[in-house]
Amino acid sequence: MEALTYAVPALFCLVPTLMMGGAVFLLVRVTRRSREVRGAWSSGLTAEGRCLRTYQTYQTHRTYDGTGDWHRGGVSATVHHVYEFTTREGRGVRFTESNGPVTTVEGDIVTVHYAAEHPERATAHAPAPGRLAVGQGCAYAFFGVFIVFCLAFMGIAYLIFSAADEVLP
């Protein structure tokens, strides 16, 4: 019984800690990709690229109605493009990019921005540093609030379990 007394409060710390770890991981990915795109835009190197393929991935969202039933809430689609281009040095590079324009289809010619050191981290998105900064800032705000919520949850759980220890024998 005493092991259970320590396991439940530990669970209330372990789960939010894992959730915060996931949020930090996603923050690092957002920061890394934003830095790559910004570096590709600022390098000044461009090439003519061709869209080889487009495809979509779908994610189903479920909603809970409060009575114990889950319902299909909707489906969101993400458009992915596979591009190929040749660097100034003559190296052929192929890369995949998500959230591109739906108007770009197979065979279209696009302008690809890339950095000489890492052409595989190229982008076919038109330069929009303000939009990139706003998107990155929104991601930081969302994950920051999420992490603060997890910390507050852990603090409240600690206070509740501390109070219960004092009251219960």
Image (tube, rainbow, N blue to C red):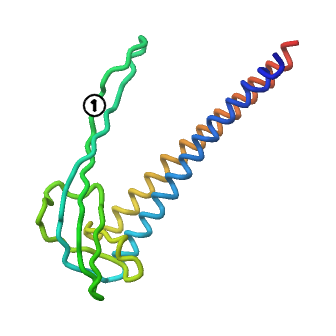
Write down the residue under mark 1: 74
Q: Depth check: 30 or 83 in front? A: 83
Amino acid carrying label 1: it is Gly
Q: Is residue 142 above or below residue 36?
A: above
Position of 80 with respect to 27 (left or right) is left
Residue at 41%, 11% (x, y): give it.
Answer: 67
Q: Depth check: 54 or 8 in front? A: 54
Quadrant of residue 151 within the rendered picture: top right
Q: Whole-percent x and y of residue 113?
A: 29, 75
Q: Whole-percent x and y of residue 69?
A: 38, 15
Q: Depth check: 53 or 110 in front? A: 53
Q: Whole-percent x and y of residue 96?
A: 29, 62
Position of 35 with respect to 155 (left or right) is left
Residue at 43%, 13% (x, y): give it.
Answer: 68
Q: Is residue 143 above or below residue 119?
A: above
Q: What is the crowding at mark 1: few (fewer than 14 residues within 10 Å), some, or many (at least 20)?
A: few
Quadrant where the N terminus lies?
A: top right
The secondary element bearing badge 1 is classed as: strand
Quadrant of residue 103 within the rendered picture: bottom left
Q: Is residue 89 above or below residue 61?
A: below
